Structures are given as structure tokens and as C-alpha cells.
Image (tube, grey):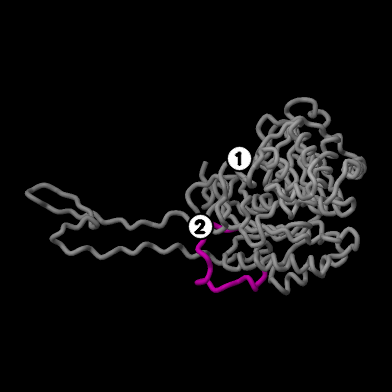
């Protein structure tokens, strides 16, 4: 997923949880609280000291008074110390927990207090363009609360299409970002974590060599996931944006080096896991970074843009199962669902935001005409105009039109008058699956609300 960045070392402002309806709440900085609807504040209320009632007899009648309301003629009661936050439990043994290597283990008294001693889960996604981390605790069934986040554009796949290898400078940028992630994880006791790498490490000749360097320098062990797993996780992360009454969805995740597309049939009885309704999927070996490098992303003419669309369309033509949702495409119960920096950027430009605001973007509906106008607007801007836009900026000014070309090719194969925008995806899918597998939302488990 080609996600947006919030600055070199800033906590990610657009991190999200999994929730049944689009979020309308902004996420505070990383260590504070989540962007998503939550039950209670991060960390929970401090236990309050309660005065004990004592019984007195006065003139034959009973009087009840509190110790903390001591009469003036009596010495004050000793102060009752506020209870300290509970100490987090130790990391359990197991394959999931083992993904965080021993260098992340720390002394018990140095760990950060956990929110209400809830189990803590982490998801890290090292993509072709971004390095992103989410740390969360479970909330109500199917929901979670983000307690820390990080995102940085590293462009790990820069030059990969031409050379077939990750460059030294790109690897240096990625390692620096991963060191920040390791620091964030080091002071937490994790119930489970999954740290994944996608297309850049999948396709690079030195991808495994790079991950060995990551292990040595950061203590993090990343797994390279295949494209089918990447598509499934993206679907899992966006399940709550598919409303009741929907029959079919084409979900697409435009990444930096690849683009995943899943065709989802949700007619009939719906499973709690949207990924179980995938009827066909494909992964295109092209993303915003690789397409921009192939055709040029800085100065894009109409001819260049059309050539980009044609190239992506030729890849889609090889997808034999692309017609799997034809039976639901002609009614109002079908729509597109996009999760990537491309569609969130389009949404921000569409809303004319002075600065990117996840609260207004995530879950936004755009009609076909609005998408057409935004693509034309961006195509009409030169590079400096794109840089000047607060929802694009210098980091993605040379990538956004490549993303629009991929979007236009997708719309050409699966035309729809409705596009829903998701500022969420793979990391949220990882967290949702980790928590579901751990049973935190089952009846009676702490961290999941009872029905």
C-alpha cells in the first residue's frame, strides 16, 4: 500500500483502527490516543482512592461520613496513594512473538505501561515507498485502538526497476526508519507482532541480503509476504467500509512497486472476515514508483499519461478472472474501494483541504464525475503546482499521476459510479487478523466487549 507520510520522524497522523463505520475522529500524536472511536482514554482511568465509610453514633441516630471529609477539629487522614499502572505481562512464547528478536527484550521496569494492561499488538509494513508501523490494543469486538504509529517515505524501491537491486542509499534510508520502529517496539511488551516486507524485497535480487542487514542492525525480523497474502490483508483492513446491502466490490491497493486487486462477492450471508469473500484476485507488477520511473513522473503530458494507462491496461488484460463480478456490476450494489496514497490524495484535492485530514478522507464517497475532474485537475498542474498542494507535497508530486493512471486503468475494466476512499489497509488487516487469531474479541476475554 502506497501510504501517505507525515514527516521524517513524526508519528503517523493517519493511522487508523478497525471499526464498523468510517472514522470521524482525528488521531492524536502517537503516544497519546487513537484516531478511531474508542471506549475510554488511552491507558484507562487511574484507579481512584475511595474513602471508607465509618459509622458514628450521635444523639441516638446513625451518621455516615467519609474519611476524606475529616472535620476541622480532627487531624487529617493520611493521604491515600494513587495506584500505579499495572505492569505489563511478559511476552509469550510462540512464532508470532518470536518475529521480534531478542534485542527488543528489555528490563521489565523500563517497559512503557500498557493501556489497562490490555494485550498489545504491532504491525509493520516495509513497502516500496513507505515504512509504516502501527501499535494497537483491542477494543470492542472487531475494533482496536492505536496507541503508537510511525510512517516515513523511504523509497526503498528507487532504481529497482532499472537495476533489479536495492541501492545502498535506499537501504540506508529504510534501515534508519526501521531503527525508529525498533525503538518504539523495544519498550513495549507485545502479545503478538507481524513485520512484513512487500514488493521491493520480493523482487530485488538482494532482498534477502537486505533483510539480514535489517536483523543485524535493528533486531527486527521481517518476513517477505507473497502477493496473495498482501491482497488478503488489504481486504481484511478495509472490511468495515463495505456496507450492508453491498453485493460486490473491487478493492484495489495501489502500491509503490505492485498493485493488488481483489474481487469480492458479498451476496448472501456475510462472514465476519471480508477476505473470505474474495472470488478472484491479481497483483500487477507495477506501482507508482515503478510506473513513474518507466514513463517519467515529474513532467507528465497527456500523451505520457495515456501511455501509462495503456501499459497498465495491458497487464489487466492478462487477468483471466476479471469478469467474476459482471453479474453485480450493473446495479447500485456494486462499487470500487481504493486504499492507497493515490486515492487519499485525490480525495484531499477534491475536498480542497488546506492540510490533509484523515477524518474527512477515510470512508469518503466520490462519484465518477468527481474522480474525472480531480484527475484532469492534477494532469493540468505542473510539477511545482503539485508540490505546492498540501495534500500532495514534494514527496509524492512525481508519483501521483502514475497512481492516477493505474486508477484510470482499473476504472476502465470495472466502471462504477461510486468509489469509496480508504485511509487504511495492510497494517490494519494484520492487526485485525492477529487479534482475531488471539481470540481477544471472544466472549469473556479481556480486551473485547461482551455482547
- Percent from the top left, x then y, of residue 270? 68, 36
Q: Is residue 418 above or below residue 203?
A: above
Horizontal and vertical percent for residue 92?
60, 65
Closer to us: 204 or 291:
291
Q: Gap between marks 2 and 1, in whole Å?
A: 22 Å
The answer to whether the residues at label 2 and label 1 have Cβ atoms under 8 Å apart is no
Q: Is residue 447 left or right of residue 48?
A: right
Q: Residue at x 66, y 34 (%)?
A: 243
Q: Secondary structure at mark 2?
A: helix
Q: Which residue is mark 2?
A: 115
> Is residue 115 within the magenta segment?
yes
- Tell me the element at label 1: loop
Is residue 265 depicted above or below 133 in this figure? above
Q: Identify the residue at horizontal 63%, vertical 47% (top origin).
A: 355
Q: Residues within 10 Å of mark 2 (few under 14, many from 20)?
A: many
Question: Residue reaching furthest top?
Answer: 331
In the rendered image, residue 123 lying in the magenta stretch gets the answer: no
* Position of residue 108 measured from the top left corner of the image (x, y, whole percent): 52, 71
Relative horizontal placement of residue 221, taking residue 40 as reference (left or right): right
Q: Position of residue 259 (x, y in %)?
A: 81, 48
Q: Can residue 260 be seen at all in this image of the molecule?
A: no
Query: Residue 83 appears in which quarter of the rendering?
Result: bottom left
Tell which circle, 2 or 1, labels the residue nearer the N-terminal end.
Answer: 1
Please rate how many residues cluster around mark 1, counting C-alpha atoms within 10 Å: few if below 14, some from 14 to 19, many from 20.
some
Q: Residue at x 78, y 60 (%)?
A: 155
The residue tagged 1 is 20
Residue stretch rendered in magenta on the structure? 101-121
Question: Which of these two is toward me, 209 or 152?
Answer: 152
Instruction: Say above or below: 218 vs 43.
Output: below
| Label of residue 130 in the image | none
x 76%, y 41%: residue: 251
Q: Is residue 429 left or right of residue 280?
A: left
Amino acid at each position: 500500500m502506497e501510504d501517505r507520510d507525515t514527516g521524517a520522524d513524526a508519528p503517523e497522523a493517519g493511522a487508523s483502527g478497525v471499526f464498523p463505520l468510517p472514522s470521524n475522529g482525528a488521531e492524536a500524536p502517537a503516544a497519546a490516543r487513537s484516531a478511531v472511536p474508542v471506549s475510554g482514554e488511552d491507558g484507562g482511568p487511574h484507579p481512584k482512592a475511595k474513602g471508607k465509610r465509618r459509622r458514628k453514633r450521635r444523639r441516638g441516630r446513625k451518621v455516615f461520613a467519609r474519611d476524606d471529609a475529616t472535620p476541622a477539629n480532627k487531624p487529617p487522614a493520611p493521604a491515600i496513594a494513587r495506584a500505579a499502572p499495572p505492569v505489563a505481562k511478559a511476552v509469550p512464547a510462540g512464532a508470532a512473538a518470536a518475529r521480534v528478536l531478542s534485542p527488543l527484550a528489555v528490563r521489565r521496569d523500563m517497559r512503557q505501561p500498557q493501556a489497562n494492561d490490555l494485550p498489545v499488538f504491532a504491525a509493520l509494513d516495509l513497502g516500496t515507498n513507505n515504512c509504516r508501523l502501527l501499535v494497537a490494543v483491542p477494543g470492542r469486538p472487531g475494533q482496536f485502538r492505536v496507541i503508537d504509529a510511525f510512517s516515513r517515505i523511504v523509497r526503498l524501491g528507487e532504481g529497482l526497476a532499472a537495476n533489479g537491486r536495492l541501492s545502498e542509499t535506499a537501504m540506508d534510508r529504510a534501515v534508519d526508519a526501521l531503527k525508529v520502529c525498533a525503538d518504539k517496539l523495544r519498550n513495549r511488551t507485545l502479545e503478538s507482532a507481524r513485520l512484513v516486507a512487500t514488493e521491493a524485497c520480493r523482487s530485488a535480487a538482494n532482498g534477502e541480503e537486505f533483510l539480514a542487514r535489517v536483523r543485524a542492525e535493528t533486531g527486527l525480523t521481517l518476513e517477505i509476504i507473497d502477493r496473495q497474502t498482501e491482497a488478503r490483508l488489504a481486504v481484511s483492513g478495509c472490511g468495515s467500509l463495505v456496507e450492508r446491502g453491498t453485493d460486490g466490490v473491487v478493492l484495489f491497493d495501489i502500491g509503490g512497486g505492485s498493485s493488488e486487486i481483489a474481487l469480492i462477492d458479498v451476496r448472501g450471508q456475510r462472514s465476519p472476515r471480508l477476505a473470505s469473500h474474495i472470488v478472484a484476485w491479481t497483483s500487477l507488477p507495477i506501482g507508482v514508483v515503478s510506473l513513474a520511473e518507466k514513463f517519467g513522473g515529474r513532467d507528465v503530458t497527456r500523451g505520457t499519461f495515456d501511455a501509462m494507462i495503456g501499459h497498465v491496461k495491458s497487464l489487466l488484460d492478462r487477468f483471466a478472472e476479471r469478469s467474476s463480478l459482471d453479474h453485480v456490476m450493473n446495479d447500485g450494489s456494486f462499487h470500487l474501494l481504493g486504499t492507497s496514497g493515490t486515492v487519499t490524495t485525490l480525495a484531499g484535492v477534491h475536498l480542497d483541504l488546506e492540510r490533509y485530514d484523515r477524518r474527512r478522507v477515510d470512508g469518503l464517497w466520490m462519484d465518477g464525475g468527481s474522480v474525472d475532474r480531480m484527475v484532469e485537475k492534477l494532469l493540468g498542474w505542473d510539477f511545482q503546482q503539485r508540490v505546492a498542494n498540501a495534500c500532495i507535497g514534494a514527496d509524492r508530486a512525481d508519483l501521483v499521476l502514475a497512481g492516477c493512471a493505474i486508477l484510470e486503468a482499473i476504472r476502465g475494466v470495472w466502471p462504477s459510479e461510486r468509489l469509496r476512499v480508504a485511509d487504511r489497509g495492510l497494517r490494519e488487516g494484520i492487526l485485525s487478523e492477529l487479534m482475531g487469531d488471539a481470540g481477544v474479541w471472544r466472549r469473556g476475554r479481556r480486551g473485547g466487549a461482551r455482547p
